[in-house]
Image: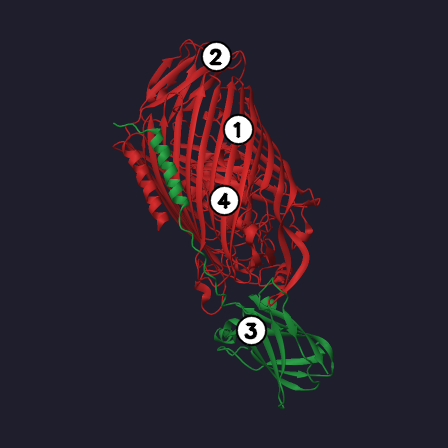
Amino acid sequence: MKKVRLSVVLTGMLISLLALSGCKRKDPEPENEQEEINYMELIFTPATGGNPVTFVFSDPDGPGGNPPSISAPPLRARSSYNLNITLAKIEGTKRQDKTAEILREADKHQFFFIITPSSLMTHRYSDADKNNRPLGLQNVVETQTSGNGKLRVVLRHDLNKAFPNLSSANFQQAGGETDIDVEFSLTVQ
Amino acid sequence: MGCWLSTTLVSCWLSLQWLEQEECERFFAGQVIDSHRGQPIASALVAWEHAGISLYTDQHGKFEIAKRCETTAYITISKAGFQQATYSLTHGKEFVLLLTPETIELEPITITGEKIAIGQASAVTTPIPEEVLIQRQGKGLAEALSYASGVQILRTGSSIAKPVIQGLHSNRILVLNNGIRQEGQQWGLEHAPEMDAFLASELKVIKGAATVQYGPEAMGGVVIVKPPALPTKKGISSQWHLQGASNGKQGIFSGQVSGYHKGIGWRLQATGKRSGNIRTPNYFLANTGVAELNFSLAAGYQKEKYGVEVFFSRFATQLGIFRGAHIGNLTDLQFALSSPRPLVEAQFSYQIDNPRQRVIHHLFKVNGYRKHEISQWEYQYAFQHNQRQEFDIRRAGRDKIPAMNLNLFTHLLELNYQTSKGKHWQWKGGVSGLAQSNLNVPGTGIRPLVPNYWVTAAGAFALLKYSVPRWDLETGLRYDWRHLEVRRFDRNGILQRTQRWFSNFSATVGVAYHWSESIVLRTQMASAWRPPSANELYSEGLHHSAAALEFGSDSLKSEQSGKWTVGIHAKTSTATLEVTGFAQYIGNYIYLAPQGETRLTIRGAFPVFHFEQTQAALWGSDILLHWQPFQVWSVLLKGAITRAKDLTNNAFLPWIPPEQLSISLQGHIPLPAQSRWKNGYIALTNLLVARQWRTPPERDFAPPPHGYWVSTLDAGVCYRKEKNTLFIGLTVYNLANTTYRDYMNRFRYFADEQGRNFQLYLRYITHSP
């Protein structure tokens, strides 16, 4: 039988390595981060009518880039407001609504509102999921006496909504994870 | 497309080489030396009982046996005035075989071919014994390796385990899978080695930098995983494993059939594994199931002068990530830390939900050898495809879209030459080339954590060994080039193309001194390097499971290391002792440095970490003592200490294993010699792990967990009938159902380690003519 020459082996190896390293290199495709929410609006509409007050959280370059901008104009004391939340993804001048995504998965999500001091404002949910458990895109809040404090808005995902007495005080025990956790300064005057 | 074409060409060309080969003729050679005086022994009787061969050594003490199609010869050497000795020889090399005069009272010992193997003579190497392999194969590679003292495990929950060799892991160690550098996404702490532990018949750890022979990254050590050699004589043999475990209701099946037909040895192998939610002493861990299905095929044509082997394997796993460790932000993490039990309640289930990983690894290789009288050529080509998909908990039906979807293709070519000159000199040289592409599959809807990149690398090395009776001296040098091209979108959506060149020398020098046939001293000084990995260069954003904002830096330089190891191996008739010491310095050590600031995101505030470089040092020692004072009782003691410091900042390095000590008391059940039941044993092992006090508190979310003590009970027995063997083993892990947490588990913040586990394993080996 024929013997294999080493030079053949060497040449073969060299050629194949050159062939392999010459593979065509394509540019990557940009990812469209559709899921990302980088914009949240809290729209306080006075129950008695009048101009709404809007709280805005906006972080168009996402986590880790430039700091987000947060604005929270004052609310009137001893007033009732309908509080609606809208979520979006802002990219340049484009605005993509994300509120409907939460609404579609209402049974897997819930907003929680942590008001400090609690004497500043009361909160109740005015919407519900298919199991008649609150969601929190629509709410009613009533401001009390004037003062300064904080309003923390948390959106939990994949939590146990059947957790007994689920509230803004114990939601962490219901499992799930945080999709949104934003703190606004709250001024009631 | 072009890539695939050239791959096919390479394989075709190599297969052609294979067809041109002839049949196998094997030579086993040795020189018998008086261990006391260092003189050759003439007319010593060399008997290979199994093959029915016996002959005498010539006046230089030399002998040569020609035998077709055997890979290992088991020979007994006897001579009046000397103690009889038994050796196992691999073919094609001349071994120095020592015979001890009877006046020195020592038991006959077995030396394997290790003393002779160039490149490993001065390194401290720990093989994993076969019986340990059988027990632990089902738990994965890291678990099997952790038998060796000095090897520990870095876990992510119960389903992901990575080996840590003397304090280093991931990209700082190298795994050789069937002779091939395993190229997966090994940079990730939560990325386990992608291979089937049941394929291994030989598993060992080199505790030392072996960069000269194996290339960059082999800084802390090398894991060598070898499948059994292909048969070279007629007959079919098979090996079957069946295992069950109570915790997780795990079932494993693995089978291997090998045979020899018309000059071709072949082997088929497959493994299937399924397990569900793991239970700690007090609760189930949600979503911790694993499903694995692997297979491999191999065929080889082996002769004395040349041979070729083709191998293909597929590893596919799907594993759940503990649901309770999935957090949205720092507040979630802190709440989880304060909670004594996970917030996600679970029952037993086999279901694997998000978050989960799906990993597929393909390896195709062709290798061969050509042997001349004293020299040998070896070549190999390998193609690896690693696909990693990670699925996260997402909204709006995106659960089925992977959040990370990476394809890594690697081609590897190697050519080695080995020869000897006279009795004393041996040298080995080699060249290697690597072409790699890492491609993100578009459509994840998430900015890729690691960008698309291409690596082209080449290396060349030479090793020189000088042997005289009692002494082996080794030295080697290597040079590597590595070119990295990266294409990615930066934060502003602008395409960036960057190129980096890395090149480095590595060197090694080592000595082995055979003080007597029972005591060997080995010491080695080796330099090593590794280029920064893609995540260290380009991470940019939120690392969910770490609750941190991590930023890479593309100005990072290569890490440079020097590692010194020293090992004493002593063996008497009743005891074996192995002590290893090491000291390592790593310049430009890459680590995640806390920046002391938090940044606000829509999910709350996160701490900021940057990949930075510092000077680091690691040192430590490990010990293994096996003492069998009586036929029926033996004690196995293992311990390891590792220390690691960031020298620049005078701080400790994180994720360094704490001190540990394992004491095992074994009872060997005496069975009558004529009984078909053999090797019955029962063993109680106590593992004591100290608390890791030496941690950098500012780089951790919680104080390290307390030390713990876990007991394991093992029992096993063999049943032999003709050529068939059945092994039955039972292990009860965590006998007392102790609740504990381990510092080296990344999910220690969230849950306890697994509770009591009964494991039953059966192995059946058959041979038919």
Instruction: Name the subunit of mark 2.
Output: B
Mark 2–mark 1 distance (CA, rounded to whole Å): 37 Å
Q: Measuring from the top left, give residue A184's x and y in whole percent.
A: 66, 73
Whether callout 3 and callout 2 share a subunit is answered no
Mark 2 highlights which residue?
Answer: B82
Q: Does B473 sit above or below residue B611?
A: above
* C-beta proximity under 8 Å, tags 4 and 2: no
Amino acid on which the number 3 mark rests in the picture: Gln
Contact (CB < 8 A) between labels 3 and 2?
no
Chain identifier, green in the render: A
> Residue B721 versus residue B240: which sits nearer the camera?
B240
Residue for point 36% across, 14% down: B55
Question: Which of pointers 4 and 1 lies earlier in the amino acid sequence?
Answer: 1
**Is the residue under label 1 in contact with that under label 3 (CB below 8 Å)?**
no
Q: Position of residue B513 (x, y in %)?
A: 56, 21
Judged by depth in the image, the label closer to the viewer, 2 or 1, is: 1
* Direction from residue B125 to residue A5 in the image, left or right: left
Q: CA distance from mark 4 to mark 3?
A: 50 Å
Helix, strand, or loop for circle 1? strand
SS at circle 3: strand
Q: How many marks?
A: 4
Q: Identify the residue under disc 1.
A: B476
Q: Residue flagged by tag 1: what amino acid is it?
A: Gly
Chain for numbered disc 4: B
Disc 4 or disc 3, which is closer to the eye? 4
Q: Colour of chain B?
A: red
- Packing grade of label 1 (10 A; few <14, some 14-19, many >=20) is many
* Residue A110 image label: 3
Q: Which residue is mark 4?
A: B483
